[in-house]
Image: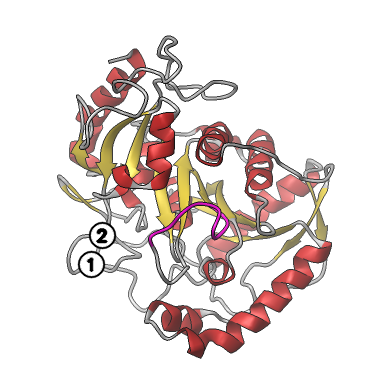
Amino acid sequence: MNAAVAEALGRIARLDPALSAFTEVWPDAPPGGPSPGGPAGHPVDGGPPRSGVPLSGMPLSGVPFAVKGPSGIRGYAARRLRAAGAVPVGSTAVPGPGTHWQTWGLGAHGPTRNPWRPDRTPGGSSAGSAVAVATGMVPLATGSDGAGSVRIPAAWCGVLGLRTTAGLLPSPDRTGLASAGVLAAGADGAQAYLRAVTGRYEPSLPEFPVPAVWSADLGFAAVDDEVERVARRAVERMAAAGLVRLDATSYDLLDPCDAWLAVRGGQPDLATAVRAENDHRLASLFARTPLLLTPVTPNRPHGHEGPGERYSTSLTWSFNLSGHPAASIPAGFGPDGCPVGLQIVAAPGQDASLVEMARAAELITERSAWSASPH
């Protein structure tokens, strides 16, 4: 066992009883035996194990990571990460029986808690993955995103969350709504993930400032004033630093709620008209503008009693229907002390460019949004 893995396991042992981010922890080896290419904790190329952080410019050999849910270790992304020498240390919490999928995590020690405010949810469904990364238990964790399940917990826990382009990686979701994703402490981790799981990393952002469109509500969502204010300030800092050049044009989509529910319910024909119109609007936008910026959620993290009648997914699930890659990056903190996420969306296939935009934003967005840690 290398030092990075030992440190991760020690941190999990100390922090997880209060947070319940994990359902299982693997101090020896995950189910299914040693990682491909060699025993757990040893690189495929036979070189020395490396520290888990920082990840920049380094292979994944010896880097600890967590997998989403009980089946995550068998997923394509986890297999590719293990083949690159990364070491899975446990499976993270997802919704439990009888809970709303977009709200909860249920770990070995009870409901998964937001590390910034234990009385609030971390979001879901990649709840435990986000908490594990936010608290430094692991530098990155796998996730999947069918309506915002990577981006929402990333936003509410203050980490980077990337939902990949539909079809970029294999997905067991027959509806086509869910794509694989990653939760990481920063852009270095997301870059390492993409390079390992896709075998390439080719960002194609134009020179800065990058043309971008800001939409606070996509034309239909009821967004809390505090959430909009924090996300908008992050965009203004990016513009002032020369990262983006904002297009003054307002931008609206049709509300995708009924369409998403129809597709998930096995009635995709009922969603045809909304999907076609939104696909047309998005194609027109990305033909002239590389980036769309929005808040990740319309609301702040809610209590463990549930979200009530509000959909935390209202600003994210449009892009599950359309298949676009989208990321959540830390924007700052609301008056309740919880993080707020800024969503950045790009054209299909521009996943690496989103990560590079996140990297640039790390340097200028409110520093506490990236460097603060709840533990």
Disc 2: CA contacts within 10 A as few (<14), some (14-19) or many (>=20): many
As drawn, which residue projects farthest toward the top? 48
Q: Quadrant of the image for the C terminus?
A: top left
Of 45 and 158, nearer the camera is: 45
Secondary structure under tag 1 reads loop
Secondary structure mostly taken by the magenta-highlighted segment of the chain: loop
* Mark 1 surroundings within 10 Å by alpha-carbon count, few (fewer than 14), some (14 through 19), many (20 or more): few
Residue 244 percent coordinates (x, y):
78, 49
Residues drawn in magenta: 164-172
Residue 301 in view here: yes
Q: Which residue is mark 2?
A: 95
- Residue for point 32% across, 63% down: 103
Residue identified by numbered label 1: 99
Left or right of residue 63, residue 167 in this image = right
Q: Is residue 85 above or below residue 119?
A: above
Rounded to the nearest angstrom, the CA distance separating label 1 from label 2 is 6 Å
Is disc 1 in contact with disc 2, using a CB cutoff of under 8 Å?
yes
Relative horizontal placement of residue 93, taking residue 124 as reference (left or right): left
Residue 189, position as x, y percentages in the image: 51, 33
What type is the residue that disc 1 sits on?
Thr
76 or 257, which is in the foreground?
A: 76
For numbered disc 2, what is the local secondary structure? loop
* In the image, residue 120 above or below residue 173: above
Q: Nearer the viewer, residue 270 or 294?
A: 270
Q: Is residue 77 magenta?
A: no
At 43% across and 43% down in the image, what residue appears?
A: 77
| Vertical comparison of 302 with 366: above or below | below
- Which quadrant of the rendered structure holds the N terminus? top left
